[in-house]
Image (spheres, rainbow, N blue to C red):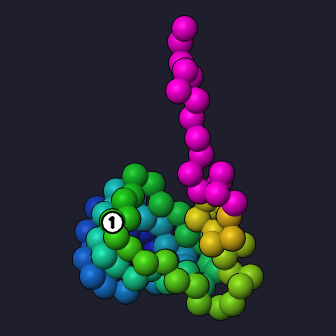
Amino acid sequence: MQVLENWHPQGITVYMDDKRFLNCVLTECKLVYGGGDVTWENTQFVNCQLTFDGGRATHRRLPAELRPDAPPEKVAPTVAANSGVN
């Protein structure tokens, strides 16, 4: 797996398969996912577009919150207003 650390691309196409993103900021990039392993830690995606290469089955390997068929509660979980210490 290729490790990309402290990388800050802007406006390019990024093929995500078999990569580990560490402390990166991707801005206005086209992200292409084809079903391979991908991880990111402390990484930000700013105005990026995610596309799938390889058919509908490839998105099943993504975390649930990033899947295009994810239920709304998986995409934007709600937090109770009174959560925390009383």
The answer to whether residue 64 shows anywhere in this view is: yes
The answer to whether residue 5 shows anywhere in this view is: no
Front residue of 3/74: it is: 74
Percent x, y for residue 31?
Answer: 45, 79
Residue drawn at the location 65% of the way across and 51% of the way down = 73
Residue 26 sits in quarter = bottom left
Judge from the rendering whether residue 49 lies leftward or rightward of residue 86; answer left or right. left
Label tally: 1
Front residue of 69/53: it is: 69
Residue 10 sits in quarter = bottom left
Q: Is residue 80 magenta?
A: yes
Residue drawn at the location 54% of the way across and 8% of the way down = 86
Q: Which residues are magenta?
A: 71-86
Q: What type of secondary structure mainly makes up the magenta span?
A: loop
Percent x, y for residue 84?
Answer: 53, 18
Percent x, y for residue 41?
Answer: 45, 54
Q: Badge 1 is on which residue?
A: 46
Residue drawn at the location 53% of the way across and 12% of the way down = 85
Q: Is residue 35 magenta?
A: no
Determine whether 35 is above or below 38 in the image: below
Tell me the SS state at disc 1: strand
Residue drawn at the location 58% of the way across and 41% of the way down = 78
Percent x, y for residue 39?
Answer: 53, 63
